Image (cartoon, rainbow, N blue to C red):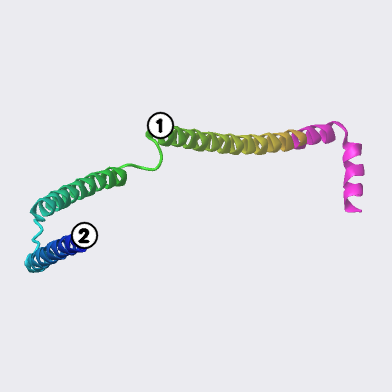
Amino acid sequence: MAKIEELTAVLIDEIESFERSVATLQKENEKIKSTKFTIDTSLIEEKYASLITSIGEGYKEQNKQIRTLQNKLNKTIIFPKWMIILFSSFLIIFLLSLFLNFNQYKKAKSHEETAYNKGKEDFYNYMLIFFEDHPESLEKYQKWSKK
């Protein structure tokens, strides 16, 4: 029986300590429920603000560089200067050649006409001299031309 009493005493002690622990746990639970957490986000907000300002400055710098590049592109021409000079010199040489060939053609045409007229006149003079030297041929020619 003494053992039962001992067991009962130990069991009562354990129950009392369990009740104390439960009471302490309830107090701590109440403290936790009543405690409000305040999170300090000021550092994160400062980092985001500095990040936003640096992004804005970068954006402005990029826009400035793009505008200067667009201005440079607007001022430039599609073809390089050496190509324009080369093309214009070829065009000038072609036009000069065309003009000279046309003048030579006109001169050749006028030379042909003068040579033809001179040949015609020489032939006419030769025929007159021939008919003066041969009057019978003149008569035969006049008969032939009437037919």
- The residue lying toward the viewer, choosing from 53 and 24, is 24
Q: How many marks?
A: 2
Disc 1 and disc 2: Cα gap in Å?
Answer: 119 Å
Quarter of the figure with residue 28: bottom left
Dominant SS in magenta: helix
Q: Establish if 122 lies above or below 11.
A: above
Sort mark 1 into few (<14), some (14-19) or many (20+) by Cα contacts within 10 Å.
few
Side of 74 relative to 28 (left or right): right
- The amino acid type found where label 1 is placed reads Trp
- The residue lying toward the viewer, choosing from 99 and 103, is 99
Farthest-out residue, front: 1
Query: Which numbered dot is residue 3?
Result: 2
The image shows residue 9 at horizontal and vertical percentages of 15, 62
The range drawn in magenta is 124-147
- The amino acid type found where label 2 is placed reads Lys
Quarter of the figure with residue 136: top right
Residue where numbered disc 1 is placed: 82
